[in-house]
């Protein structure tokens, strides 16, 4: 019997590189929002008899803001880039191919309309783009940018589950055989300046304009903050930088806007403002105007664990219920993305009215979150995101009753560090948390101005702790040290002193070293660590502070021992060699890493007279 319905899976790209190629918070947000906008355009053209499976068309407060036929600029969720770069839908088989082609055509047309608006309004912005065949270069770059893949699979007698499996296999094959378009003659000039952010596209503006004038000085006064860094920008970077002015709003031309917010300018806070907890847009002010402190910022890359397997239904006991599972899971992810994430990252409206500002949400698509926050609130924010994610997906269970979890990567650096490097480091830290520490976990990368990069990570605190059982994660000790430092019960020098006292006990600093541990008994090294730690807490605080840290330290060390035992046991079952690093060295490096992280993230708490090392 012929299938009456088919499964359509649609995916657009590029994603991670496109978003991460950014100079400012606006670039980051703009790339994310642009992808969500294009996906929404494709979904909204689906016919009435199509059924959207993923993402869910519903959020916690009704229909998804970007999927409404009439966009509401007063909806607080309208500027949240929350749609992933793919969607799954069931469509009538007899019109399936036409629907897929129509969706692709709509997405490409929307992208072209956005790019055209940038080109047509460049003159009003004061950007010189009208000489040396730049229009041909602009058009060619825009035309070849989007990578769109889709796959149709009939839902026959074997049902939705089998169709979904085959669809995924075939779409993966399609994406691995993408069309290659060679550079045409006369389009790219030999020796031309490259885009400062992508490193590959030919720059169309930047440096000296055709008349020899610095192009950033020709930009209209009210838009000059967008080009403060005087980047060389190619077509794609330029679209990301100004499409909110030329397409979403009527700031440049009197054409009816697609989306006009109350302020009309799509305000995005600058990196110095985020670090200083201020409300200043873009790059209107220099970092020096925010005072001597608060000059460190953190990027968080938060991602669900094994989401591919959860979505595919690998953990389901009854595979015949996969479609219902997809619908429920999709609603749960939408609830998370459009629920409290914005409030967790940026603070409540009441807080902001009182002048209390937190971070800047860059992207939230289902289980995936990218945001920028003040360095000393990074762990707290990541913990809150994980808690909210677990609450939103609590009803999704596998055959053993387990629910989805998530891991996070955190990168902390000075506000003048390259933003692309910061985002990339956060994404790498998230991979490290999952693959090295063991999901669910978090990992912190410290990018020091001296060029040194250090890492620390830990498992999350358990959700429930039985009486008499320790909290085995590293967050408890981290939070307690930070709390005592903030309340001035511990000196800001404390974590530095702990590192200073414990570092001489390290022997395995590199693989070149042939030294062996002079302490091989675990109880002995734990006693040594506790004594040194307690001594530092007493000297840099008080006996009360030392006593307050006793249990969190004991719990953390116990958690490290438990984690190491679980890893060794699993490796033995898998027939693998034991972990090379000695347990003694692991305990020392883990505690040194924790103290380095809390010191670096909270370095603005330092005494005014103290000059912290880089």
Image (spheres, helix red, strand yellow):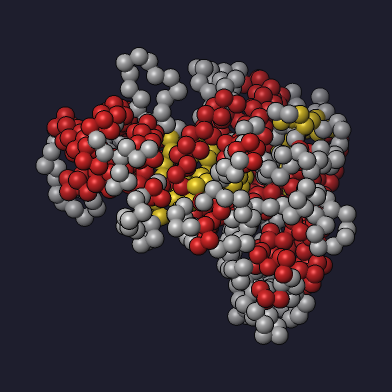
User: In the image, what residue occupies the spot 59% across and 68% down?
Assistant: 229
Q: Give percent across and percent down for residue 324.
A: 69, 22
Q: Is residue 440 left or right of residue 342?
A: left
Q: Is residue 369 left or right of residue 324?
A: left
Q: Nearer the viewer, residue 184 or 241?
A: 241
Q: Give percent across and percent down for residue 419.
A: 53, 58
Q: Is residue 530 above or below residue 256?
A: above
- Residue ranking furthest to the top: 467
Q: Nearer the viewer, residue 37 or 542?
A: 542
Q: Is residue 41 above or below residue 587?
A: below
Residue 365 visible (yes or no): no
Q: Is residue 102 above or below residue 190?
A: above
Q: Give percent across and percent down for residue 546.
A: 25, 32
Q: Quadrant of the C terminus?
A: bottom left
Q: Give percent across and percent down for residue 260.
A: 80, 50
Q: Quadrant of the N terminus?
A: top right
Residue 301 visible (yes or no): yes
Q: Is residue 42 left or right of residue 446?
A: right
User: In the image, what residue occupies the spot 36% across and 62% down?
Assistant: 450
Q: Quadrant of residue 534?
A: top left
User: In the image, what residue occupies the spot 57% across and 18% down?
Assistant: 317
Q: Is residue 362 above or below residue 76?
A: below
Q: Nearer the viewer, residue 470 or 219?
A: 219
Q: Quadrant of residue 246?
A: bottom right
User: In the image, what residue occupies the spot 59% across and 44% down?
Assistant: 355
């Amino acid at each position: 019997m012929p299938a009456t319905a088919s499964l359509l899976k649609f995916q657009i790209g590029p994603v991670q590189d496109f978003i991460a190629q950014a100079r400012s918070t606006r670039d980051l947000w703009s790339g994310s929002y642009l992808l969500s906008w294009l996906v929404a355009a494709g979904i909204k053209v689906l016919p009435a008899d199509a059924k959207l499976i993923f993402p869910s068309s519903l959020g916690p407060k009704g229909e998804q803001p970007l999927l409404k036929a009439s966009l509401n600029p007063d909806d607080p969720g309208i500027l949240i880039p929350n749609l992933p770069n793919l969607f799954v839908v069931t469509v009538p088989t007899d019109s399936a191919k036409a629907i897929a082609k129509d969706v692709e055509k709509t997405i490409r047309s929307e992208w072209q309309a956005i790019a055209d608006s940038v080109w047509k309004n460049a003159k009003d912005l004061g950007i010189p783009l009208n000489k040396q065949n730049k229009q041909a270069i602009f058009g060619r770059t825009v035309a070849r940018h989007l990578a769109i893949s889709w796959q149709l699979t009939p839902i026959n007698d074997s049902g939705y589950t089998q169709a979904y499996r085959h669809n995924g296999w075939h779409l993966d094959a399609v994406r691995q055989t993408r069309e290659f378009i060679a550079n045409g003659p006369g389009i790219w000039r030999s020796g031309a300046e490259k885009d400062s952010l992508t490193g590959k596209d030919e720059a169309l503006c930047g440096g000296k304009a055709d008349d020899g004038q610095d192009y950033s000085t020709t930009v209209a006064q009210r838009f000059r903050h967008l080009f403060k860094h005087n980047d060389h920008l190619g077509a794609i970077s330029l679209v990301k930088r100004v499409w909110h002015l030329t397409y979403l709003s009527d700031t440049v031309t009197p054409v009816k806007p697609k989306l006009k917010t109350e302020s009309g300018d799509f305000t995005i806070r600058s990196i110095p403002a985020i670090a200083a907890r201020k409300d200043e847009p873009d790059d209107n002010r220099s970092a020096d105007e925010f005072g001597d402190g608060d000059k460190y910022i953190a990027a968080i890359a938060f991602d669900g664990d094994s989401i591919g397997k959860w979505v595919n239904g690998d953990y389901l006991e009854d595979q015949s219920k996969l479609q219902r599972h997809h619908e429920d899971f999709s609603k749960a992810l939408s609830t998370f993305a459009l629920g409290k994430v914005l409030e967790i990252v940026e603070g409540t409206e009441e807080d902001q009215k009182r002048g209390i500002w937190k971070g800047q949400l860059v992207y939230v698509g289902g289980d995936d979150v990218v945001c920028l926050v003040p360095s000393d609130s990074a762990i707290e924010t990541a913990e809150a995101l994980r808690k909210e994610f677990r609450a939103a997906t609590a009803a999704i269970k596998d055959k053993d009753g387990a629910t989805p979890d998530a891991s996070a990567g955190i990168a902390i650096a000075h506000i003048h560090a390259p933003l692309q490097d910061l985002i990339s480091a956060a994404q790498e830290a998230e991979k490290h948390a999952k693959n090295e520490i063991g999901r669910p976990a978090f990992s912190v990368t410290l990018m020091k101005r001296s060029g040194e990069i250090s890492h620390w990570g830990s498992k999350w605190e358990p959700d429930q702790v039985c009486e008499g059982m320790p909290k085995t994660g590293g967050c408890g000790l981290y939070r307690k040290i930070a709390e005592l430092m903030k309340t001035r019960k511990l000196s800001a020098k404390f974590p530095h002193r702990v590192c200073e006292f414990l570092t001489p006990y390290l022997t395995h600093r590199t693989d070149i070293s042939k030294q062996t541990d002079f302490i091989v008994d675990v109880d002995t090294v734990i006693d040594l660590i506790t004594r040194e730690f307690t001594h530092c807490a007493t000297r840099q605080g008080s006996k009360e502070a030392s006593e307050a840290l006793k249990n969190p330290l004991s719990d953390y060390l116990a958690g490290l021992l438990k984690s190491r035992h679980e890893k060794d046991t699993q490796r033995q079952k898998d027939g693998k060699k034991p972990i090379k690093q000695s347990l003694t060295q692991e305990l020392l490096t883990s505690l040194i890493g924790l103290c380095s992280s809390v010191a670096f993230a909270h370095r603005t708490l330092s005494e005014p007279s103290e000059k912290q090392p880089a």
